[in-house]
Amino acid sequence: MNSPFVVTSGEPAGIGPDICLSIAKRKDNSDFVIFGNIDLLNQRAEILDLDLSLIEYQPTKEQSELSNNELFVTNFDLYEECLAGSLNKKNSPYVLQMIESAIQACLRDEFKGCITAPVSKEIIADSGFDFKGHTEFLGHLCGKKPLMFFVSETMKVALATTHVPLKDVSAMITEGLITDSCKIISQDLELYFTESAPTIGVLGLNPHAGESGLLGNEEQQIILPAIKNLQNQGLKIDGPLAADSAFLQEPNRDVILSLYHDQILPLFKYSNPHLAANVTLGLGIIRTSVDHGIALDQAGKKHADYQSLHFALNTAKKMANHAERKNRQTS
């Protein structure tokens, strides 16, 4: 059996354990190892009336292929008993330990990539940890400056800034930020998604991309010089584009670079409900995730929607296959 992917089960009180259990019904269930508490996963399976078997994953041994309704699991101990729908900040270290262990294993090439179920930023931060979100934490673990990237069957968008207050965004938009973001996009999209260097459209910061300075000067003073510099280096980039019409213009762009979290994501998520994945670029490893939160109100219920998780699983596999083929072509 080839190296599998690791799937972290996320906030234990949320929907993460539920949607992870759905992997047992996939034909490629042997390709994934769930990180989580085995007792919790068994309890949640019982609540959901799922007839499945959890098998301890042993990385030092050759694992046989799983049968239908079986899952590989690496056990992590909860700090306190967990009830579906009821957050307990004492279990925050459990959540972080799963993520850190998964990423460290990916960096050691024990897994092809990592897929993460959702976590609660608020409960982890309330526990005393400096935690702004998965993306920032993964960047810290990998020693990289990561980039948030969202992908569906029809749209690809990246974010120059992540989880920061809107009042701070303008000061963060620099030529260096635009340059670094576009280089990460160009490199990782060609490795994981496209056959050649991708075409990137960069949004302006202000309404209508500033209207030639009438509505703001960041476009003329910062964004456009960065774009021209990158064009001179051979990257396929255009902009600044007005955010309200960027997807109505040139249809052949591979990706749109948004300058802040809610500039383009509301449109993206509305256009791609549950059939999209959150991808972290720039880590040096593959990481995908669901595009939704912990959904406490749905945890332990039988109507959980697991489409986004499966889209994230499929995206990770496509990325790995694309990278393997690229590496064979260049070796």
Image (tube, rainbow, N blue to C red):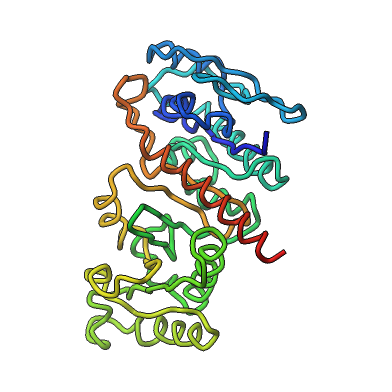
Residue at 51% from the left image edge and 76% from the top image edge: 179
**Does 185 sit left or right of 244 as displayed?**
right
Q: In which quarter of the image is residue 307?
A: top left
Q: From this viewpoint, which residue is outermost toward the front?
A: 329
Residue 88 appears in the figure: no
Who is closer to the viewer here, 276 or 138?
A: 276
228 w.r.t. 75: above or below: below
Q: Is residue 217 left or right of residue 18?
A: left
Quadrant the C terminus occupies: bottom right
Relative to 135, say whether 181 is above or below: below
Q: In this view, does 262 lie to the left or right of 24?
A: left
| Residue 43 at x, y percent in the picture | 47, 13
Q: Where is residue 209 in the image (x, y as percent from the top left)?
A: 27, 78
Residue 228, position as x, y percentages in the image = 45, 87
- Residue at (55%, 63%) from the top-left corner? 188
Q: Which of 80 and 301 is in front in this view?
A: 301
Q: Is residue 291 above or below residue 7?
A: below
Residue, far right:
60
110 to 69, vertically: above or below: below
Residue located 44% across and 82% down the image: 227
Q: Which of 298 and 112 is in front in this view?
A: 112
Residue 162 visible from this viewpoint: yes
Q: Residue at x 37, y 66 (%)?
A: 258
Q: Where is residue 232 in the image (x, y as percent from the top left)?
A: 51, 88
Assign the N terminus to one quadrant of the image: top right
